[in-house]
Amino acid sequence: MAVSLLCGKSNSRMNYFFLDASALAKRYVVEIGTPLINHLFNTVPKRRMTALILALGEIVSILVRRRNDGRISTRAFRQAMAEFRVEIAEASDFLLQSASDDLVRMSLALIERHSLNAPMLLSWAVLCRSLRFCGQRMMT
C-alpha cells in the first residue's frame, strides 16, 4: 500500500510504502511479485518504506519454511538471511513500527467494517502517529 503525505508549509509530497511480510519476503525468495519489490528497493529510499516489526519474525518463518521444504537451498537461505538482516532487520533507515495493544483494539472495528488487511491498517495508523511533524492532509 502506498500513501502520500502532504507535509509542512510547502505542501511537499512524500510517498510512504507499507509492506507486509509476504511482500518483503519476495525480496529474498524469487516468486511472482519479486521484480516489483526489487524495483521498489532500487528506486525508493528505505526511509520511505515501513512495516510492522512483527513482520521480521514472519519473514524469517517464510524463509525457514522455503528452506525446509526444499524450495531454496541452505546456501540460498543463508544468503537471504544475510541480506534481510542488512536491508531490513538491522537497517537504521527502514521504518519498523510497533503497534500498541490499544491501537490493535481500536483497529478491530475498522478492519471489520471496511474489510481491511490488519497489518497494513496498523502500519498506516502507527506511521501517521509517528509522523507528527507532517501536515494533516493525507491521500491514499
Image (cartoon, rainbow, N blue to C red):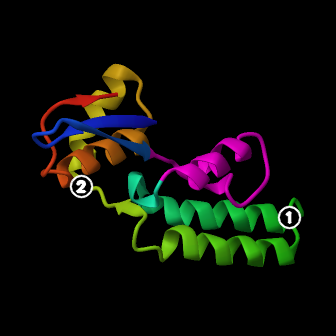
Tell me the number on the disc at residue 101: 2
Q: Position of residue 14 (x, y in %)?
A: 32, 42
Work out whether 42 lies above or below 11: below
Residue at the front extreme, as displayed: 10
Residue appearing at x 40%, y 74% in the figure: 92
Residue located at (72% from left, 68% from top): 64
Q: Secondary structure at mark 2?
A: helix
Query: The disc labelled 1 sits on which kind of residue?
Result: Ile
Q: Residue visible at 32% across and 21% down? A: 113
Report which residue position mark 1 lands on.
72
- Front residue of this view, candidates 38 and 55: 38
User: In x, y percent, where is residue 98?
Assistant: 31, 61
The picture places residue 54, in percent across and down from the top left corner, at 44, 61
Task: Out of 41 and 119, give the one closest to the viewer.
Answer: 41
**Between marks 1 and 2 in the image, the one whose residue lies nearer the viewer:** 1
Residue 82 locus on image (x, y percent) = 66, 78
View extreme (left): residue: 9
Q: Which mark is residue 40?
A: none
Q: Is residue 26 depicted above or below 116 in this figure?
A: below
Read off the magenta span: 18-44
